[in-house]
Amino acid sequence: MIRVGVIGLGRVGMLHLMNSLKIKGASVVAAADASKSALAKARSLGVKRLFEDYRKLLNSSSDMDAVIISLPNYLHFESVKLALEEGFNVFVEKPLALTLEESGEIVKLVRESGRKLMVGHCLRFLEVIRKMKESLDKGVIGRLEVATLEEVINGPFAHPRTPTPVSEWWFDPRKSGGGALFDIGYHMIDLFRFFAGDADVVFASLDYKFNLPVEDGAILILRSKEGSVKGIINVGWYQQTIFPRYNFRVILHGNAGFLSSDHLVPHNLYLHAAKEGFKNLLRKVAGRRIRYLSYTYYYEPFYQELEHFFNCIKKDLDPMVSVEDGLKTVELIRQAYTLADNNSCKE
Amino acid sequence: MENVVALVRTCDLMEEIRDFVFESLKLIDFKPSGRVGSVVIKPNLCYYWDADTGYTTDTRVVAGIIDWVRENCGDVDIKIVEADASAMRTKLAFKVLGYENLAKEKDVELFNLSEDVLVDRAVKVNGREISFKVPKILLESDLFINVPKLKVMKIVKITCAMKNLFGCIGTPRKVVYHKFLNEAIVGINKVLRPHLTVVDGIVALGRHPIKLGLLIAGTSPFAVDWVASQIMGYNPSSIKFLEIARREGLGKPENMIVKGEEISEFAKIFPKEGIISTGSLWTLQFWFLKTYQRLVGDVIPSILEE
């Protein structure tokens, strides 16, 4: 049994907690959050040990195997560092940390500690991305030439049916690390690396439509290290969309064909939800294990990434998303910010 | 007394929107009564969605009003005001929605109504006593200008002149009034009496945003809403808060005159809400999800919850 502590119970942290409770062979023994209502919800889900200060959780829970960290970005470094020093395996939501220096120090700590650390690059687990990667690796579209990746959504303004207040740390670059590029560009850069390998940023343009200290839109061009694959990234926080509307797509252009995520995702998410919900109902009636969150399509990876991480701990395997993947993504984002500041292209 | 409501067709150019604001006020022959020393302008800032989404008042309309005030009232103290809401923080909304830039450009002040001295006011509507915390500034200003957006709203069908005053309540958790929202809208309109209403319908919101290219001006929020509801495809008598307002003496439909463009010109292109509103669909979807969760034990991400 993997015994888990969940640190940070915001929207994503609470989802991690609920998923951990459903994963076979895992149990949530403790949770921490500054919000009393979040802790009350965790209690109602059966979590016994609750802390307002995550440091107390880390200092007093030697019976845990792993912690899941979903704190605001500026707390990633100190919480990950403390968790590794206390000897826990760590799953940390993206970004790995705010800066290259912090990320580098975490890489060093992971190597020294011998613990596992996985960063929540959840889109790698999305069904459509896995299918595209498989087809690419099989050579279905020949040699990859260009990948276009885009996600234009609400970012921190995302809300359920009723709007909710936005935490102000999002708009302080010292706390968030950046805006739309650091938030969702992070995923697109990671996906480019997933498809094309290591890369450099050769062009970066940032937008500030919201008059905030952080960018609300970014367009980047990347080039793979070996030089042949170009990536075009377009991300933004400026679009008013409420899930299940989700403006995300990847197109892989090869010399023998192309793959577009738009062709491979469910065209109608309501029908998809009905179909998957019905299948789960049948599984339940037949006494079989259900496929958690499959009805949402886009939230299923949150379950799968944790299941994968727990499996890596159990079987002593390397996680599919390494600490180095986190470091390299932060590195490319910092490259992009430098290029955008200099308002120039890299030769 | 007759209530004049003006409909003016606009285009999308900055300089011309100012002219359209002037034209709309000329059509209703608006003149402030008495000496004007202080002016408050209340746009509708809705969450952090900008004017092109159909949710928030276009800064260009407010800019035109500021110009009109300066030309007609001289160098007076002008404040653009808004109050915090359950989910929206005024300070951030002013920045994100371009009002901070407008204030700098026009040299006017931005003012958070939730930080003002709040005065207790109680009124009776439909036999129900309703109390509000009302920002003092709105009761004391010489010229109070209401600048709502033209849009549909799931609970009370339309949100325009009268509903925008509901946004003036100083306490952020206005959701407490939602169980009797029709009465609360009428109640706050009994307490707050703007001298002028200019509706931004340049981009309006129905089933989806639409470039309607319209400004509506009037001195009675009731009369403005009576006209606006027809543009949005409703029979005004079917709007409950308008009917209550009529009974409570806030306006009379028979005393209205519409000047400028025809209502039908805008009504025919406005994307009316379907028979099943987005809100009802969401409620239905949530009910299915909860039932599914009870039966199967699956996880529901909070983003899909109410």
Image (cartoon, rainbow, N blue to C red):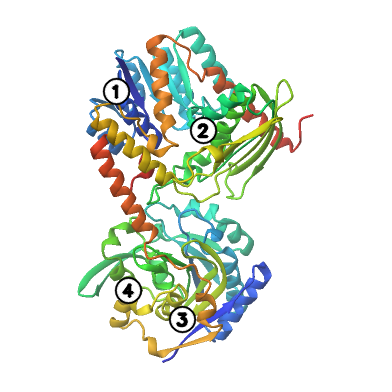
Q: Residue furthest bottom?
A: B1
On the question of residue B298 being in view, the answer is no
What residue is shown at x 24% (from left), y 27% (from top)? A287
Q: Give the position of the N terminus of chain A as an image quadrant.
A: top left
Q: Name the chain letter of the residue that bears numbered label 2.
A: A
**Cα distance in 3D space between marks 3 and 1:** 61 Å
Q: Position of residue B164 (x, y in %)?
A: 42, 67
Label 3: which residue? B219
Chain letter, disc 3 residue: B
Q: Which residue is painted at 58% across and 29% down in the image?
A: A191
Residue type beneath disc 4: Phe
Tag 2: residue type? Val
Q: How far across and down, in percent of the image, does residue B15 sit?
A: 68, 70
Name which quarter of the figure residue A259 lies in.
top right
Mark 2 neighbour class, 10 Å CA radius: few under 14, some 14 to 19, many 20 or more: many
Residue with the mark numbered 1: A28
Provide the secondary structure element on which disc 4 rests.
Answer: helix
Q: Secondary structure at mark 2?
A: helix
Q: Is B156 left, or right, of A236 in this rendering?
A: left
Percent position of residue B295, x then y: 24, 38
Amino acid carrying label 3: it is Thr
Chain under numbered label 1: A
- Residue A128, labelled with which disc? 2
Identify the image quadrant of the C terminus of chain A.
top right
Q: Which one is nearer the viewer's eye here, A57 or A143? A: A143
Say if mark 4 contacts mark 3, CB within 8 Å: no
